[in-house]
Image (spheres, helix red, strand yellow):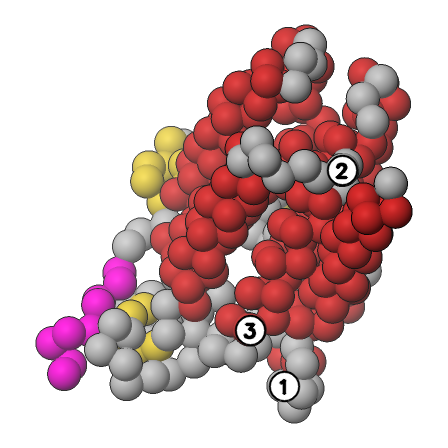
Amino acid sequence: MIALYINWDFDPEIINIYGFPLRYYGLLFVCGLLLCMHILKGIFRRENLKESAHEALFIYGIVGIFVGARLGHCLFYDFEYYSKNLLEIFLPIKINQIGEIKFIGYGGLASHGGTIGLVISLYLYSKKYEIKYLKILDLIAIVAPLGATFIRLANLMNSEMIGNPTTMPWAFIFRKVDNIPRHPAQLYEAIAYLIIFIIVFTVYKTKNIKLGNGFLFGLAITLIFTMRILIEFVKINQVEFENGMKLNMGQLLSIPFIIIGIYFMGNNLIRKETK
């Protein structure tokens, strides 16, 4: 049985040039974003939206996701530390006790914060380019699960967000962490999000399904955060204060997103029936 376990011992750094590391996390994050933008380009053409609006979406999207994800991590998961080290929220550095500065990259990003940041940035984007807000949320919702897939693969390469110990034959031994066979929780999420992408994209492409603005957004966030809650049960806690909690921070933060998603889907279907 032990021979079936997967020994995972990847170095998170691909290359280090004069103290500036190129990491798998950043590479996969960018690749996922570029693939999403490529798919969105075809969707924008199908929806008869301007190419200039598609090009600008990249900037709005990456700023919203990154700022929101960074602030989300600092506020939701490690507020005590970052409230005393405000500079490290905004700069990819760590300052030790004797004042030495080390470049470490942005190690803490939270998906819930990234979602909130993206939703806010898309509101500004919709006003600037005069696209209905719910419409652009729907279009982004088509590719968002695919982007989330790449992020979880990046977590896998970092040997972070690991699962609880298990004896399942597909268990991973994360050598950078310990020698215990564990659930590859990052891989579970990546597969789940890829399936959600296929579902949402198929609903969008199916011509005989007529849905109003907001339904795809509701469908995507409901499925994504439902899976997040379920998979969290086989993950180790990310921060110490979660120990002893029946639901961890990731699960608690997911509940409002599911409620919002169900509201958008239900409201859409109700309005459709009353027409």
Residue found at x 62% / y 39%: 209
The image's mark for residue 243 is 1
Sort mark 3 into few (<14), some (14-19) or many (20+) by Cα contacts within 10 Å: few
Residue 63 on image: x %, y % = 70, 32
Give the extent of the magenta segment: 1-9
Circle 1 residues within 10 Å: few <14, some 14–19, many ≥20: few
**Residue 56 colored in magenta in the image:** no
Q: Earlier in the sequence, mark 1 or mark 2?
A: 2
The kind of residue on which mark 2 rests is Gly
Above or below for 44 versus 16: above
**Which quadrant holds residue 177?**
bottom left
* Label 1: which secondary element: loop
Q: Quadrant of residue 167?
A: bottom left
Seen from this angle, which residue lies furthest left?
3
32 to the left or right of 59? left
- Is residue 269 positioned above or below 42 on the image? below
Give the Cα distance between marks 2 and 3. 29 Å
Which amino acid type is shown beneath numbered disc 1?
Asn
Q: Which residue is the site of mark 2?
A: 212
Please say if 57 is above or below 70: above
Question: Residue 128: x and y, percent?
Answer: 85, 18
Q: Say which quadrant the N terminus sits in.
A: bottom left
Instruction: State how far apart marks 1 and 3 are (Cα).
Output: 17 Å
The residue lying at 53 percent from left, 79 percent from top is 233
Amino acid on which the number 3 mark rests in the picture? Leu
Callout 2: SS: loop
> Residue 23 at what x, y percent from top left?
41, 42
Q: Is residue 200 left or right of residue 83?
A: left
Q: Residues within 10 Å of mark 2 (few under 14, many from 20)?
A: some
Q: Nearer the viewer, residue 88 or 272?
A: 272
Q: CA distance from mark 1 to mark 2?
A: 42 Å
